[in-house]
Amino acid sequence: MIEVKGQTLMMPDGKRFRCAIGRGGYALDKREGDGATPIGTWPFRRVYYRPDRVAPPKTGLKTAPIVETDGWCDAPDDPAYNRPVTLPYPASHEEMWREDHLYDIVVVLGHNDDPPVPGRGSAIFMHVAREGYLPTEGCVALKREDLEKVLTLVAEGDAIAFLGP
């Protein structure tokens, strides 16, 4: 199992990668908008990628290209909460097609999705890190090359454990 402790992602084979976590640190009781990375074990669901910037990642997970109308609902009172949506969308949402490179490769993690509980957190992803590994909004982020390496070792049914500080 892949584990994240502090700001280090640890692979089962012993490889380690620096990563960024949420600006709110780690949380056992994740809430929408707290900026925290949720402690727990979350399955890998799917990989999205920007086809105009990167090739489909080599991985054992399902992949799909991001298109300009892709979004992710983060409105707790909306029926599509913590689900992909098509833009324009009337409720609060994230845009998946970003001008920065954070979502050039983005992995959906199975946090609060089976079924989603309003307000317990949405859009917990593994994605490309900002320069300097600046904090995320609650996701885990790696250098693109490291993310690509990790994905080559991930398959359907695998999970990631966020252990905390």
Image: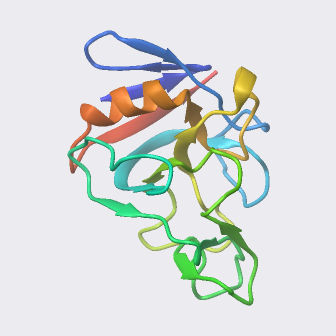
Closer to us: 146 or 139: 146
Residue displayed at 53% across by 48% down: 104
> Which residue occupies 33% across, 44% down?
57
Residue 54 place in picture, x, y as percent: 44, 46
Q: How is the image coloured?
A: rainbow
Image check: 133 left or right of 144?
right
Q: Position of residue 2 (x, y in %)?
A: 36, 28
Height in image: 135 above or below 29? above
Identify the residue shown where x is 51% and y is 62%.
112
Quarter of the figure with the N terminus: top left
Does 88 sit above or below residue 161? below
Q: How far across and down, in percent of the image, does residue 140 sit?
A: 58, 37
Q: Residue furthest top?
A: 14
Who's the residue at 71% across and 38% down the image? 22
Judge whether 91 appears above or below 20 on screen.
below
Residue 41: image location, x then y, percent:
42, 42
Residue 25 placement: quadrant: top right
Q: Could you tell me which quadrant the C terminus lies in? A: top right
Residue 102 shown left or right of residue 112 in the figure: right
Residue in front for this viewpoint, 52 or 85 = 52
158 to the left or right of 83: left
How many discs appear?
0
| Most distant residue in the front direction | 52
